[in-house]
Amino acid sequence: MIDVQATYYRRRAIVARQSAAAAMDPYVKAAFAEVANHWLGLAEHIEWLHSIRRGSHDRASGDAIISLTAHRSS
């Protein structure tokens, strides 16, 4: 599943990197590079959070199936 938020953040990182590449002033270049890294960090964090949610949902479903199976075999 494509995460719209993470994709948005990654696109913002690309724009920031492009701005860094075009900047003449080394301080501005460094600032844009730092912003790009933060956008990428946000994208990775969102993806991690979603993977945790999916994992807990999968475990909860699996626990319910195991519980139901154990109950039926009793």
Image (spheres, helix red, strand yellow):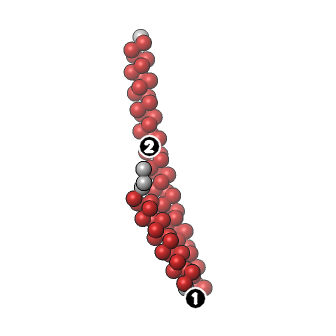
Residue 17, percent from left and from top: 54, 75
Q: Is residue 35 visible?
A: no
Q: Amino acid at mark 1?
A: Asp
Please give the name of the residue rendered at 40% of the width and 27% of the height, measured from the top-left corner. 64
Query: Dot 2: within a 10 Å radius of its alpha carbon, few (fewer than 14), some, or many (20 or more) residues?
Result: few
- The circle on residue 25 is 1
40 lies left or right of 64: right
* Residue 23, quarter of picture: bottom right
Which mark sits nearer the N-terminus, 1 or 2? 1
- Above or below, 61 against 31 in this view is above
For the residues labelled 1 and 2, the Cα–Cα distance comes to: 44 Å
SS at circle 2: helix
Q: Amino acid at mark 2?
A: Arg
Point out the residue furthest to the bottom here.
24
Please give the name of the residue rendered at 44% of the width and 39% of the height, measured from the top-left corner. 56
Residue 39, percent from left and from top: 49, 67
Query: Dot 1: within a 10 Å radius of its alpha carbon, few (fewer than 14), some, or many (20 or more) residues?
Result: few
Residue 58, percent from left and from top: 44, 37
- Above or below, 1 against 19 in this view is above
Comparing 1 with 29, the one in front is 1
Q: Is residue 12 visible?
A: yes
Comparing 4 with 57, the one in front is 4
